[in-house]
Amino acid sequence: MNKAAEKLFIAQPTLTSAVKDVEQELGISIFLRTHRGVNVTNEGSEFLTYARALYQQYEDICLKYSNDAGIRRKFSVSMQHYSFAVKAFIEMAKKYDASEFDLILRETRTLSVIKDVGSLRSEIGILYMSEQNRKLISSLLREKELEFHTLIRCPACVYLAKSHPLSGERELSLAQLEDYPCLSFEQGEDADFYLAEELISEHIFQKTIKASDRATMMNLLEGLNGYTLCSSIYNEHMSNDSFCVIPFKESVDTPNTIMEIGYITKKGMSLSSMGKVYIDEISAYLTGERKTAWKY
């Protein structure tokens, strides 16, 4: 409360009184006050989500109609580990002067993507759904009052380094890959395997390695001749042209599947101006990639 009062240039008792007035008017308790400090209640957390949405709309109005050049644009995205989404973020940022915005890009776990957008910590979340994870992901989205918007549908592919012994193959099956470690992004100790970023996650692999970030994943792919199963969307410039994607050869036991990559937003909320530009950049990139990404 003291820190908040300082930022608002008011006395702490004045802020405390204003919060109590809001709580009394709405008939809820936003904060739980104890001798150790102040904590947000469950209903307070929900209230703050709507308050953030309201304030975001206020900022959009200011940006559209105000002549004040000092207003700073704010925009944040949470995503699974996609190089094309990073590339689109870069292109979006280039359209704005560096003195006019505060941008945040989070490459994080699947559940964190959903939680970030659900609490409006991020305006947009980038993730995928498939037949394997659709039921769980849809349930989590409904719980957080989120909407999924499809960007592209693409088949599963094998992602590996060009130095890999199998990089010259036209297609690859799990039988061909069983001698090499399967890499995946770590989702937390208690995470359901349906939250995995990689496809066919329920298959039992002989060798598995988990990484927490994309740079480490790249190093493991090259250094250990590892591989991962992901989408066919590949950005050579973001990966130093050292990796390749090869179509996954399905079998009776391991059928191929389609990844439906999209973005999530809070229900009933329209995208900010920066959000619209970002999605436009992703769509433009994916539309161009659709023509070339599946040529091997």
Image (tube, helix red, strand yellow):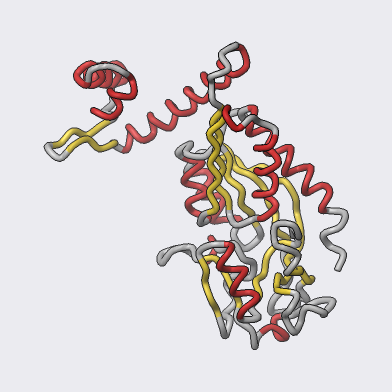
Q: For this rendering, which residue is in front, 78 or 250? A: 78
Quarter of the image with the C terminus is: bottom right
Answer above or below: position of 145 versus 256: above
Q: Position of residue 162 (x, y in %)?
A: 75, 75
Position of 31 with respect to 171 (left or right) is left
Q: Position of residue 67 (x, y in %)?
A: 60, 11
Answer above or below: position of 258 versus 54: below
Q: How many marks?
A: 0
- Residue 233 visible: no
Position of 167 with respect to 71 (left or right) is right
Q: Residue at x 71, y 61 (%)?
A: 231
Answer above or below: position of 16 versus 170: above
Q: Position of residue 117 (x, y in %)?
A: 51, 41
Q: For this rendering, which residue is in front, 87 or 35? A: 87
Q: Position of residue 59 (x, y in %)?
A: 53, 21
Quarter of the image with the N terminus is: top left
Q: Residue at x 48, y 64 (%)?
A: 192
Q: For this rendering, which residue is in front, 246 or 267? A: 246
Q: For this rendering, which residue is in front, 75 or 101? A: 101
Figure quadrant of residue 181 = bottom right
- Residue 145 visible: yes
Q: Residue at x 72, y 71 (%)?
A: 158
Q: Residue furthest bottom?
A: 179
Q: Residue at x 39, y 33 (%)?
A: 46
